[in-house]
Image (cartoon, helix red, strand yellow):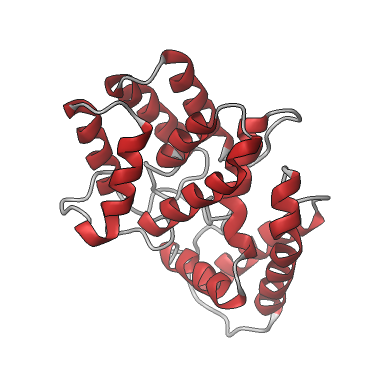
Amino acid sequence: MKGAGGGPAYPARVATTSPTPASAADLAAAWRRLVPDSPASRAVGAELLARWAESHRRYHTLDHLRAVLAAVDRLAHLAADADAVRLAAWFHDAVYEGRAGWDEERSAQLALALLPRCGVPPGRVAEAARLVRLTAAHAPEPGDRDGAVLCDADLAILAAPPDGYAAYAAAVREEYRHVPDAAFAAGRAGVLSRLLAMPRLFRTPVARELWEERARANLAAELARLAEPAPPQPGGGEPPDELA
């Protein structure tokens, strides 16, 4: 998920330092279970972990990847190809500059380039890339089981307990610290209002049962906070145009 637009804030490159083993060991093991083991697949896994650990990230981090994979596991029985969904989760924010649409397209292209090296069949590679592109708008077509599972898993953070949701919202704001407060609040409020106007946030029945009510409460509470008066801030900047 994205939280703000307005052009690139950070370069899309692999971090120069690797994530600490303690923070990434479980994810490395999950990657090895997902693809045939080879030097190439291990190298791709290491690159992905490094991308998710880039220093400019605050929300779109290893923790977000871990949470999305866990949510996919809860919904995996609803997918047509659960492993394609898991591969898409690995790639869906692998390129992250905070540019809505652009990041997802570059991430999909990265999946198309790297997954064949890992021995992933062409059909699954194509499906993973398609799913990555869906996360730009979180609007899978009716009957798209894989798309529904991935989008629901990516949005599951909206149903976090209040303290977890507050941490998420603060991390999103930090990722867009180049956007002035007033502009960010206006854009974010627009996003939240559009979400609350949707007849349903989640596409799968399991996700709706688990997360819909709490997510709507969290969104409404954040929207109310954003409506509180704030001191004027100088400067321009573009408002957020998509949820983070």
Which residue does the image show at 52% across and 23% down from the upper left?
127
Residue 242 seen in the current view? no
Identify the image quadrant of residue 106: top left
Rendering coords of residue 93 (x, y %): 43, 44
Q: Nearer the viewer, residue 84 or 166?
A: 84
Q: Is residue 113 left or right of residue 211?
A: left
Rendering coords of residue 34 (x, y %): 38, 33
Please identify the residue farthest to the right as the structure is shown: 199
> Relative to 175, is 86 above or below?
above
Residue 232 seen in the current view? yes
> Relative to 7, is 42 above or below?
above
Q: Is residue 31 left or right of residue 207?
A: left
Please identify the residue farthest to the top as the structure is shown: 122
Q: Nearer the viewer, residue 155 or 198?
A: 155
Identify the image quadrant of residue 197: bottom right
Which residue does the image show at 74% across and 52% down from the upper left?
208
Rendering coords of residue 26 (x, y %): 32, 52
Which residue does the image show at 70% across and 77% down from the upper left?
227
Which residue does the image show at 71% across and 67% down from the upper left?
214
Q: Is residue 216 left or right of residue 38?
A: right
Q: Is residue 88 left or right of residue 161?
A: left
> Relative to 83, is 186 above or below?
below
